[in-house]
Image (cartoon, rainbow, N blue to C red):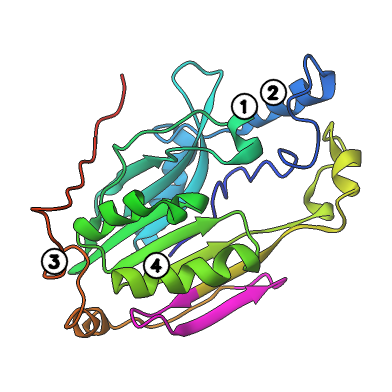
Amino acid sequence: MAFPETFVPGYPVWADISNTSAWEDADQQAAYSIYLDQAVDVDGAEFTEVVTAVRDLGVFAYIGVVERSASRGSVYCSLVAIDPSTGVVGVHHKIKPTFGERLLWADGDGAGLRTHEYRGVRLSGLNYWENWMPLARAAMYAAGTEIHVAVWPGAPHLTRDITRFVAREGRVFVVSVGGLYRQEHIPESFPLRDQLADAGPWSYDGGTAIAGPDGRWIVEPVRREETIVLADLDPAMVRAQRQNFDPAGHYARPDVLKLEVTRTRPA
């Protein structure tokens, strides 16, 4: 089960629409303060409720969150992997925030660039434009991913091409999950609400999709519909497609091309 990027408490839709870099702008500062207040402590009591729900459902889950840093003044775009038996097994901090996100999110690290095994299947996940980073994808392939989860704030034009490309390149299933943000989702009291209204009724309109390891659609991008997308995925399809191409296996040349990943988290 997978949820969009920063699903809790939400994507900062104002980052690329309003003047986020305005110096000492009272509304921008107030918006950031609210965002900090709503950020998640992954080890905190509130998120424990999410872990408990995952355990009760008996599913493996990827959940995008805005995670509060140790300084309490910065946040990370984090993708939390939760195993129903053992709880949180991974917290990936987005390596490089994109565009306006850089004014709101701190740079991440490589500690979360790992796969997780569940019921004999290797799972991986990346945030938003990390899925366009060749070496980030290569790190997931080298770790043996079979089902890759790509989380997005939402928009079919963001997921349409890259979902099928990653699936075909890695010979993996790719589950892209996009959010929905409409003007009605913005609280009346939010300081930048009027500026967001100028962008129209939709800030992000979905794009959830699933592609198979042959690059073909299993579920085409779903637009402007709040729904649960379900699919049965057969890992044998991954093995079959790797008969003629395994980017991290028999088609690799580690004597010529090497990938080094620093999987440490700064103290």
Give percent across and percent down for residue 173.
35, 73
Badges 4 and 3: C-beta atoms under 8 Å apart? no
**Element on which disc 1 rests:** helix
Q: Considering the image in quadrants, where does the N terminus appear?
A: bottom left
Q: Considering the image in quadrants, where does the C terminus appear?
A: top left
Marked residue nearer the N-terminal end (2 or 3): 2
Could you tell me the amino acid type at mark 2?
Ser
Q: Is residue 47 left or right of residue 142?
A: right
Badges 1 and 2: C-beta atoms under 8 Å apart? yes
Q: To which residue does mark 3 refer? A: 249
Q: To which residue does mark 2 refer? A: 33
Q: Residue at x 42, y 33 (%)?
A: 108
Residue 201: name its quadrant.
bottom right
**Element on which disc 4 rests:** helix
Start-end of magenta stretch: 210-227
Q: Residue at x 11, y 54 (%)?
A: 254
Could you tell me the amino acid type at mark 4?
Val
Residue 104 in sight: no
Q: To which residue does mark 4 refer? A: 166
Disc number placed over residue 36 in the picture, else none: 1
Alpha-carbon neighbours of circle 2 within 10 Å: few (<14), some, or many (≥20)? Answer: few
Marked residue nearer the N-terminal end (2 or 4): 2
Give percent across and percent down for residue 90.
31, 44
Q: Residue at x 42, y 36 (%)?
A: 42
Could you tell me the amino acid type at mark 1?
Leu
